[in-house]
Amino acid sequence: METKNRKTKTSSEVKRRYNNKVYSTVRAELPKDLVEEFKKLCSDKGISQASVLKKAIEEFINNSK
């Protein structure tokens, strides 16, 4: 008897609950030209904005100890 691969989708609600449990938001008001350049460079390099910010925060924490 052949079994079919069953595809399941995680609901948006489940993803939202998980993200709220595991992640937090950091917000900053920055000059538009700085943000535009940051977004463009991230896009050009194919890296996420979040990964750049996470690395900068980790470096700041490590250097502050």
Image (spheres, grey):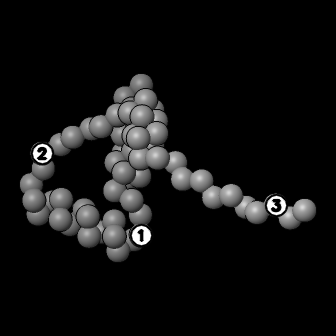
Give me the disc on residue 46.
Answer: 1
Tell me: 6 left or right of 45.
right
Q: Nearer the viewer, residue 19 or 44?
A: 19
Question: Which residue is depicted at the point 68% across and 58% down?
Answer: 6
Mark 2 residue type: Glu
Query: Residue 39: where, in percent of width, then height?
Result: 26, 64
Residue located farthest toward the right when viewing the structure as drawn: 1
Q: Amino acid at mark 1?
A: Gly
Q: Nearer the viewer, residue 56 or 43?
A: 43
Dividing the image into 4 quarters, which one contains the N terminus?
bottom right
Q: Position of residue 62 (x, y in %)?
A: 44, 33
- Residue type at mark 3? Thr
| Residue annotated with mark 3 | 3
Q: Is residue 41 above or below residue 35?
A: below
Earlier along the polypeptide chain: callout 1 or callout 3?
A: 3
Q: Residues within 10 Å of mark 3 (few under 14, many from 20)?
A: few
Which residue is disc 2 drawn over? 29
Closer to the N terminus: mark 2 or mark 1?
2
CA gap, disc 1 and disc 3: 39 Å
Where is residue 12? Give x, y as percent. 41, 47
Check the picture and name the quadrant holding the C terminus: top left
The structure residue drawn at horizontal position 30% and vertical position 69%, both measured from the top left corner, is: 41
Q: Residue at x 41, y 63 (%)?
A: 47
Q: Nearer the viewer, mark 3 or mark 2?
A: 3
